[in-house]
Structure formats: C-alpha cells, structure tokens
Amino acid sequence: SKSSSTANSSSWTSFLKSIANFNGDLSSLTAPPFILSPVSLTEYSQYWAEHPDLLLSINNAVNKNTFEPSFPSVVEYTPDLVKMLHVVRWFISTLKSQYCSRNESMGTEKKPLNPFLGELFVGKWEHEQNGSVTADLGDTVCLSEQVSHHPPITAYSIFNEKTNVSLEGYNQIKSTFSSASLSVKQYGHALLRCKNKEQQEQKDDTFLITLPSLHIEGLLLAAPFVELDSKSYIQSSSGYFAIIEYSGRGYFSGKKNSFKCKIYKSYESYIYDKEGKPSSSASQEASGSSSEKQNNKEDKKPLFVISGQWSGISNIYTSSSDEKKRKNGQVFYDASRVAAEHLHVKPIEKQNPWESRRAWEKVANAIKSGDYNLIHQEKSQLEEEQRMLRLSEQEKNTTWKTRWFDNSSINSVQNEDFVSLAKMCNLSVKNVPSGTRVGDKYDTHASASTDGSNGDEVVKHWRFVKENWANETEITL
Ligand SMILES: CCC(=O)OC[C@H](C)CC[C@H]1O[C@H]2C[C@H]3[C@@H]4CC=C5C[C@@H](O)CC[C@]5(C)[C@H]4CC[C@]3(C)[C@H]2[C@@H]1C
C-alpha cells in the first residue's frame, strides 16, 4: 500500500495546510486515507461500558458498607459513599477506551466516519453465568443513534435490567485549531441511574457526569493522540460531589493522561475548600454554633483524593496532604490490569440498513485497503443517498423523526433529574460546553433561555425514550 513515509508526509503536509483555514467543521477536512478510521462515531458510545463489571458494581456490590481499598480507621463508609466510590472508579475506567482505543488498535488517533442522520449502532455485553457469580447479570445493552447531522450529535443509552443500572447521554463537539493542536470542547453530559431493587419506594440514585475538553497532540508528527484537559464533575443525588482535573505531560505530574480527583461530601464542601469560606448559599444554613463551625472545618476537606494516570495506575488517599506526600495511599484503579471487554455486535448480514457497520461496510473496506479513489466513490454514494432523503423530506414538507431519543425541553419531566443535579453543583443547564458553571461567560452569553423569555428558543437536551425501544420492531440486538 502507499504507506511509504514520503507519500504520508506529502499528503500530510498538504492536509496540515488545509487545517490552517479550518472553519470548525471537521467533515470539511479531507484527511489523507492513512488517518481515516473505518469506525463511525456512533460506535464511540460503547466506550462508556467496556468494563461492564465496574458499571454494574455500582448497584450490585456484595457489601454495600465498604469499598476496597478501604481505610476503615479513617473513613465511615455509608451505602451512598460506597456507591459514589464505585461510580468514580467506573468513570475513570471508561477514559482509556474513550480516548486511547484507536491508538491501541490502529497505532494513532484516527478521524472517525461522520455518521449520517438516523445512523444506529446497537450491541450487548453478555454476562455469562460462571460458577462464582451467583446472580444472573443478564445482558448490558448499548443503543446509539445519530440524532443530528448538522451539527453531528450522538445520543446513547446503556442499561442492564437485572442490576437496574442505566446510563444515558449525548455528545456533540466544537473544535478549533490553536498552535498546531486541535482543541475540542465537548457538549452534552451523561446521566447514571440506579434503581433500589429492595426499597421500591426509595427514589433512584442518580449521578450527573460532565465531559472534559480535550486536544489532539502530535498532529505535526502525523501521530495524533488525545490529551484531556480542564475538568469534569460528578454530582450524586445523595449529595456527594467529585471534581476531576486533567493534565498532560509537563503539568503537575509530568506524565501524560494525568488526573487528580477530589471527592467531597457535597458541592458546598468543595466550594468551602476551594474558596476558604462557605459558599453564599451554604453560609446562611451554617451560621450556627461554634461546634457547627468546627463541623464545617471537617466538612470542607475532601473525603478522598485520587491521582495518577487514567490510562495507567491511580492511587487513593484520605487527604490532600497524604496525596501530596504520596503516603498512606492505596491503588485505586489500574487501567492496564484488566483488558477492555468489547460488546457483541451481530454479523453485518443480519444488520438493518440503518446500522452503522452495514451502512459503511464498503467505505470501511476501502479505507482498510487505503484505496483513496474507492473511499471517495463509496462515500459520495452514501452522501448522495442521504441528500435524496433530505430532498424528499423537503418535498413532502416532513422533518426527520428520531427513533429512540427525544430532544426534550429543559422544563419537561424528562429533564427533572438533570436540572436538580445541575442545581446541586451550580452547573448551567443550557447548551454550553459540558461542565460550564452558572454565570460563566458561555452560560450568560448562551442564546436559548430556560424559560423561553423574550421569544428565545427554549433549551433542549436529548433524552432516551424507553417506550420507543420497548416498541422497536425492526432493530434487534
Ligand atoms: C482535523 C481533522 C482530522 O482528521 O485530524 C485527524 C486527527 C485524527 C485528529 C482529529 C480527530 O481526532 C479524533 C478524536 C475524536 C474524539 C475521541 C473521543 C471522543 C469521546 C466520545 O465519548 C465522544 C466523541 C469524542 C470526543 C471524539 C470526537 C471526534 C474526535 C475529536 C476526532 C477528530 C476528528
């Protein structure tokens, strides 16, 4: 194949020139074949659960009153705290698949196929019953749908009926180029729900998870890879709050894919710790007797500090000082210890035309053979079919109807959990970069409003519609 370095470097340099006047729309860039991935972006939803055992452990931990590694003499473990620790460990376990899996399987980060409107990707992790595991864990299902093409938005729902754990969310990106690195802001968020099987009357435990921004390094060397930056947050309906700060080589630890996570009893504790005084809302309640103030002192410290590499080993400590001195820590997660578990996808011949691997089969094979002309020919064919679909919708004056997800108004019941969790940690509920705080510039400048005031369009978020999947007749797992 034309993989000689000169061919690569010449087409890559012309590609880099095309990046110079990048307009923000990644699909406008014709990247050379060697950087193209045969995998569509709708498939990236599976990266939320390639350690399904950690996802399910959130709601079916055998012992709900402790978490390994434990610090029994320092920490009083409650079921809510144990759940939060499982959620943080599961979240950290998703990052290597999300952001390194292409480097592992194809050598470098690649440009994914740009999904067409209505493209679907479905699969399942089948948890075979082995002797040791008593409970039947059934299957964990992954549903992914391209709910928008301009701009590209992928919505997903991952759930396991047996352990009553479900995750839903959506993802959109906005990218810019700065100093030869592609900066990417992620829009959207993930919502995790755990139903209490025992106490039916108890409300579900819910968690709001925001997405970090990232940048693509190594573009000049034609060896791109993702580095995470900024922060992401996890807010639990039980009050616990976690902040995860990311950094790459050259930052505090000097290693790539580094992070530091602090778990607090509440968002107020986090603000107290960060700003040295109770947040405005908290201080009214906290103006109590000195013992309460003393209590606040304790409250303002993080319960745990976890640091290391999300693509390698991370350690957990029970205080910032221990973490700084790297003492009394224990291994929290080791990303290289357990291989990712890939979900089962039915063979292409059994797939529906809307399913990603069937729809893109010819393009994917052309990419794998590095045949530029064939790639272009097959891609144009697919794009032409999409153009015809849009045209016929225009003629019939109909608009595309999404299949399993609904773009729900911020004030609708579907968004209740999201709004209440966002409120707990002062996060904007508008369509702004994930993790934007209320009052940040993106929040105040956002066009859509939350109440439709002065005629603005109302803020919407993509939500999974369970009934639509229950009534699904064409797509099978
Ligand atoms: C500049 C265009 C181009 O083709 O450059 C080629 C280079 C490979 C760099 C650009 C592409 O890099 C890819 C990395 C992709 C993100 C990886 C992981 C995730 C997490 C997932 O949960 C949601 C999607 C997201 C954010 C991917 C979005 C698309 C990214 C940035 C690809 C770039 C086109």
Image (cartoon, rainbow, N blue to C red):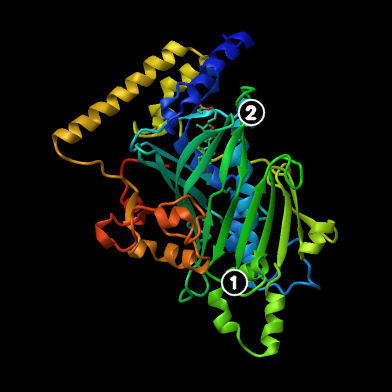
Q: Which residue is drawn at the image coordinates 18% and 31% (left, top)?
A: 392
Instruction: Check the picture and name the quadrant holding the C terminus.
Output: top left
Horizontal placement of 204 versus 311: left or right?
left
Q: Nearer the viewer, residue 350 or 255?
A: 255
Q: Which residue is drawn at the image coordinates 57% and 9% (left, top)?
A: 2
The image's mark for residue 225 is none
The image's mark for residue 218 is 2
Residue 414 lies, in percent from the top left, at 36, 61
Instruction: Check the picture and name the quadrant holding the N terminus.
Output: top right
Determine the residue located farthest toward the left in the rendered image.
396
Q: Which residue is mark 1?
A: 268
User: Which amino acid is tagged 1?
Assistant: Glu
Quarter of the image where one finds residue 113: top left
* Observer able to see residue 61: no
Residue 184 lies, in percent from the top left, at 52, 39
In the image, residue 31 above or below residue 477: above
Horizontal placement of 374 versus 67: left or right?
left
Residue 384 lies, in percent from the top left, at 29, 23
